């Protein structure tokens, strides 16, 4: 018997468990043999406060102090580049992403492989940071265990039922808890269905990624993350190489995702058309699932019909960057504390917004 049972050992579940473990006995169930296997292990791991819907931005802002105090951040910067013919779409990116126009020459100073014959427009935002995602997750796990909680892997949930004594979850062994937290990522609606709770329409979307050798042998370590207009592709330095994604969002089903070769080739071509170095064969390719609620905003809080069932889902691409504040909010809502996050943002994140 535990107080709170959390299904899902990605960043959402681990951060929630760490916050809750100070006040309750917490157990995390992860179906894979390691935590953070699916989306959390395949994240671009960047935070920019002005990225996402208004409620996401509120969580970003509220997370910054935690990241800074824990020294989880490294300055990266964010750059958008476009052709002259893409002026209207570029203007929209400037407005939506909070970037500021710079000259093409300044953009090429940041990323010397950009093609001066192609880059006609550019904009930059310095306060964008890499997150040390592995250390962040491991620190959350240490907190859970230090507070007497448990993280159990290879725990595939096959049955969930509720009675007067609480929730009974079969995942190899039998687990019982008064409160059940659904942090199952792409499997969130599936878990709700198993539990007899009405799903919220959370749909996973595939995003592919390729790892390329550093173009032209350049040192990429100080380059910003850079985007094509309308986020038609992006590239991010990573451990001496370059990650390039077509930034696709293809609705799919929960599974161990893999890159789509055609989609990846098209994205690499869009990237290649903006740089002067030829695109070589990827070192590796993979894909992750970014799961969205219908309004593309996180779902945090008690289910309006079954209050002992708590949603911690719909993170989309914002799981890591919002994790400190999202987990704090979730713990506040479960324990009955007054949330520190503003009331409008809390309301925008509640599950009942998605029920008629």
Image (spheres, rainbow, N blue to C red):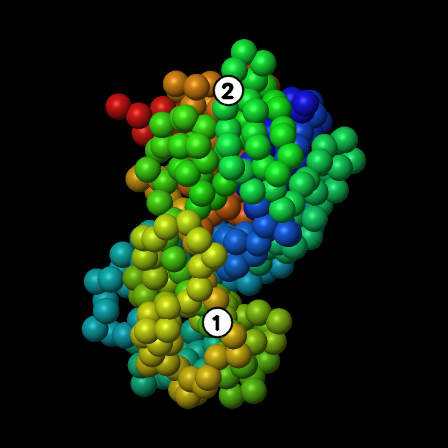
The dot on residue 106 is: none
Q: Please tell me which residue is depicted at 27% across the width and 74% down the height of the picture.
A: 83
Q: Secondary structure at mark 1?
A: strand
Place of residue 84 in the rendered image (x, y in percent of width and height, measured from the top left) = 24, 74
- The residue carrying pointer 2 sits among few (fewer than 14), some (14 to 19) or many (20 or more) residues within 10 Å by Cα, namely some
Q: Which residue is mark 2?
A: 162
The quarter of the displayed image where residue 209 is located: bottom left
Q: Is residue 219 above or below residue 184?
A: below
Determine the residue positioned at 50% across, 40% down. Answer: 184
Q: Residue furthest top?
A: 164
Please provide percent x and percent y for residue 107: 43, 74
Q: Which mark is residue 285?
A: 1
**Vertical placement of 53 versus 276: above or below?**
above
In front here: 109 or 62?
Answer: 62
Q: Is residue 144 left or right of residue 242?
A: right
Quadrant that contains the C terminus: top left
Between the C-alphas of marks 2 and 1, the distance is: 42 Å
| Residue 298 appears in the figure | no
Does residue 126 sit above or below 240 in this rendering? above
């Amino acid at each position: 018997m535990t107080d709170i049972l959390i299904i899902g050992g990605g960043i959402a579940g681990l951060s929630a468990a760490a916050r809750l473990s100070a006040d309750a006995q917490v157990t995390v169930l992860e179906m894979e043999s390691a935590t953070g296997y699916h989306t959390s292990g395949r994240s671009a791991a960047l935070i920019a406060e002005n990225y996402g819907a208004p409620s996401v931005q509120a969580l970003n802002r509220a997370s910054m102090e935690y990241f800074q105090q824990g020294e989880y951040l490294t300055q990266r910067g964010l750059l958008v580049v476009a052709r002259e013919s893409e002026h209207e779409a570029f203007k929209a990116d400037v407005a939506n992403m909070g970037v500021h126009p710079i000259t093409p020459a300044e953009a090429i100073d940041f990323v010397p492989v950009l093609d001066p014959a192609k880059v006609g427009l550019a904009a930059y935002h310095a306060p964008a940071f890499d997150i040390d995602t592995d250390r962040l997750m491991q620190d959350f796990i240490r907190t859970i265990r230090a507070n007497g909680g448990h993280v159990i892997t290879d725990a595939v949930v096959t049955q969930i039922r509720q009675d007067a004594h609480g929730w009974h979850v079969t995942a190899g062994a039998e687990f019982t808890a008064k409160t059940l937290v659904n942090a199952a990522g792409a499997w969130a609606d599936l878990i709700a269905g198993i539990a007899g709770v009405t799903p919220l329409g959370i749909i996973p979307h595939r995003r592919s990624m390729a790892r390329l050798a550093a173009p032209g042998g350049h040192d990429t370590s100080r380059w910003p993350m850079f985007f094509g207009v309308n986020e038609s592709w992006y590239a991010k330095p990573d451990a001496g190489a370059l990650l390039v994604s077509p930034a696709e969002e293809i609705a799919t089903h929960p599974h161990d995702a893999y890159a789509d070769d055609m989609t990846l080739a098209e994205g690499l071509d869009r990237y290649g058309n903006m740089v002067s170095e030829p695109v070589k064969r990827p070192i590796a390719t993979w894909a992750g699932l970014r799961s969205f609620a219908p309004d593309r905003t996180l779902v945090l809080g008690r289910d309006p019909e079954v209050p002992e069932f708590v949603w911690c889902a719909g993170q989309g691409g914002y799981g890591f960057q919002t994790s400190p504040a999202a987990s704090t909010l979730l713990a506040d809502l479960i324990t009955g504390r007054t949330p520190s996050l503003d009331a409008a943002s809390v309301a925008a994140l509640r599950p009942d917004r998605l029920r008629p």
